[in-house]
Image: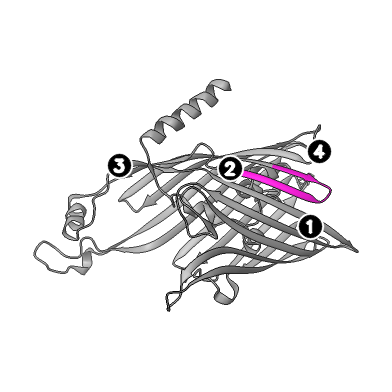
């Protein structure tokens, strides 16, 4: 085990010496999963549990819950141009540990390939127009464990394999590791997640024909070369509070802070060394039947038409309905009132929970 850990760290250091840091590399893994988390503006580091915790904070996977869990989600962005899909499956090994498998895909299909539209003589041949797809995919295996000696404390980690494709022109394989911790006591929740803990590497390979290279040169575009793209670690900190009002009514409040270290970003607190992006979410529920949710996040500074700076934000709303504590249907409506540049989207997700399968 120690040798394997040393080898992983050694490879991470060696690859980082020959890699190019990309600020928004693998950004599709920052979109979030599950309509509950999206409606609460991704404030899930401390309060996530069950199958979706594999994405938000793998430590929450071992928190108390059903033995089998299946989650599915589909969302369409930019007027249905981009499709975002998620599927997760978790299994409780025992009362203290759990494992899960997660699949995430963001894709744009049926993109027109016009690189062969014009020949060397300047003639247009529309029959040479073809279509291709671009997709970003991630496969994650997560493990989480609690401790009898410290009730409420769980730790976990996710190993993720990334596959990115741009038609037949280019592709990349990547590897990364997420680590997380959660601690819950008397209704208080705290959480920490270090995403891309050892940095995540995407090894890009390009397959360009001579005609495509000629098209690049004629249009003044830079011809890409094989390289390794590096995603630096991101630290997520969160705290939450669960309140019981009596007669089945309860509420959950959560506040998260995302810390990035890859240069200046358009966040509420921004500098060259560190950027901090806060977001807040709340949920009001009646037993395990229905829940109303809201969240505030995505704070950005923008210039108005008159040149003055202003701060924009994104408001999300959502609702969740549970049927016999087995099937849960969640809905999120993002960016209420169009207060930010992000377009609003309708997102639905489904979660199925079972303690055991019936046997004859």
- Viewer-nearest residue: 49 or 276: 276
Quarter of the picture holding the N terminus: top right
Q: Nearer the viewer, mark 3 or mark 4?
A: 4
Q: Nearer the viewer, mark 1 or mark 2?
A: 2
N-terminal of the pair, mark 1 or mark 2, is 2
- Look at the image and give the residue range highlighted in magenta: 182-193
- Tell me the tag on residue 226: 3
Q: Quadrant of residue 304?
A: bottom left
- Tell me the tag on residue 83: none
- Viewer-nearest residue: 66 or 33: 33
Q: Main secondary structure of the magenta part?
A: strand
Q: CA distance from mark 3 to mark 2?
A: 28 Å
Q: Would residue 334 appear left or right of 270 to someone viewing this image? A: right
Callout 4: SS: loop
318 up-or-down from 227: above or below: below
N-terminal of the pair, mark 3 or mark 4, is 4
Membership of 185 in magenta stretch: yes
Membership of 205 in magenta stretch: no
Q: Residue furthest left?
A: 121
- Tell me the tag on residue 194: 2
**Label 3: how many Cα within 10 Å (few below 14, some 14–19, many 20+):** few
From the image, tell me which residue sits under label 1.
325
**Label 2: how many Cα within 10 Å (few below 14, some 14–19, many 20+):** many
Is there any visible trace of residue 10 in the rendered image?
yes
- Residue 214 is situated, as x and y percent measured from the top left of the image, at 16, 55
100 up-or-down from 132: above or below: above
From the image, tell me which residue sits under label 4.
151
């Amino acid at each position: 085990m120690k040798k394997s850990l040393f080898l992983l760290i050694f490879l991470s250091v060696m690859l980082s010496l020959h890699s190019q840091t990309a600020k928004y590399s693998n950004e599709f893994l920052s979109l979030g999963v599950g309509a509950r988390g999206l409606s609460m503006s991704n404030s899930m580091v401390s309060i996530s549990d069950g199958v979706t915790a594999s994405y938000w904070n793998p430590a929450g996977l071992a928190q108390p819950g059903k033995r089998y869990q299946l989650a599915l989600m589909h969302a369409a962005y930019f007027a249905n141009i981009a499709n975002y899909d998620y599927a997760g499956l978790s299994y409780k090994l025992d009362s203290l540990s759990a494992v899960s498998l997660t699949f995430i895909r963001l894709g744009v299909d049926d993109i027109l390939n016009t690189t062969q539209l014009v020949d060397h003589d300047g003639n247009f041949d529309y029959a040479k127009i073809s279509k291709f797809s671009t997709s970003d995919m991630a496969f994650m295996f997560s493990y989480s464990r609690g401790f009898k000696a410290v009730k409420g404390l769980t730790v976990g980690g996710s190993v993720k394999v990334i596959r990115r494709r741009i038609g037949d022109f280019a592709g990349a394989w990547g590897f990364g590791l997420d680590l997380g911790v959660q601690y819950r006591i008397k209704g208080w929740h705290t959480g920490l997640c270090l995403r891309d803990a050892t940095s995540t590497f995407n090894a890009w390979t390009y397959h360009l024909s001579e005609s495509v290279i000629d098209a690049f040169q004629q249009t003044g575009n830079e011809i890409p070369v094989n390289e390794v793209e590096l995603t630096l670690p991101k630290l997520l900190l969160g705290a939450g509070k669960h309140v019981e009002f009596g007669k089945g009514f309860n509420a959950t409040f959560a506040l998260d802070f995302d810390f990035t270290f890859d240069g200046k970003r358009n966040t509420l607190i921004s500098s060259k060394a560190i950027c901090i992006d806060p977001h807040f979410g709340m949920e009001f529920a009646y037993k395990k039947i229905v829940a109303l949710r809201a969240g505030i996040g995505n704070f950005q500074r923008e210039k108005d038409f008159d040149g003055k700076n202003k701060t924009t934000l994104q408001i999300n709303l959502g609702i969740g309905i549970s049927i016999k504590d087995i099937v849960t249907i969640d809905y999120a409506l993002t960016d209420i009132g169009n207060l930010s540049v992000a377009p609003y989207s309708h997102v639905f997700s489904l979660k199925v929970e079972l303690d055991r399968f019936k046997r004859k």
